[in-house]
Amino acid sequence: MQVGIAYSDPVQQVWLRIEVAEDSNVEQAIIKSGILRQFPDIDLTEQAVGVFGKLVKLDAALNPGDRVEIYRGIIADPATVPRRQMADDDDD
């Protein structure tokens, strides 16, 4: 079956389509995709993963057409970014 693997870092976004066995889980698909070699900073013991935006465990079963997403930690609260930008503009 075909599934997608999605990951983005601050510089680039990657979307891969791969073929996996019918009984594959999330972790197996991520490993098979080769994305861990492409992004050695991905740590599946620390980073959350999901399917179509819903958090899942690495052993979650996949269905044909699923999009597996590897999430990075948030380094800034999106709600505070506009406030920071406004504060920076006031300094001018």
Image (cartoon, rainbow, N blue to C red):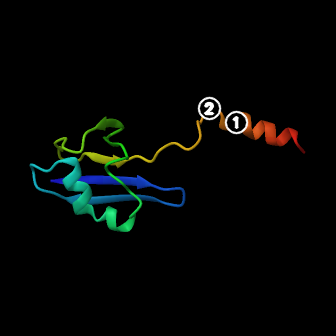
Q: Position of residue 28 (x, y in %)?
A: 19, 54
Q: Which mark is residue 79?
A: 2
Label 1 packing within 10 angstroms: few (<14), some (14-19), many (20+): few
Residue with the mark numbered 1: 82
Q: Amino acid at mark 1?
A: Pro
Q: Residue at x 47, y 44 (%)?
A: 73
Q: Position of residue 9 (x, y in %)?
A: 48, 56
Q: Residue at x 32, y 60 (%)?
A: 16
In what element is the residue under mark 1? Answer: helix
Q: Position of residue 10 (x, y in %)?
A: 54, 56
Q: Nearer the viewer, residue 74 or 65?
A: 74
Q: Position of residue 19 (x, y in %)?
A: 18, 59
Give the answer, above or below, for where 31 lies relative to 62.
below
**Image quadrant in which you'd find residue 76:** top right
Q: Contact (CB < 8 A) between labels 2 and 1?
A: yes
Residue most extreme to the right: 92
Q: Residue at x 51, y 42 (%)?
A: 74
In what element is the residue under mark 2? Answer: loop
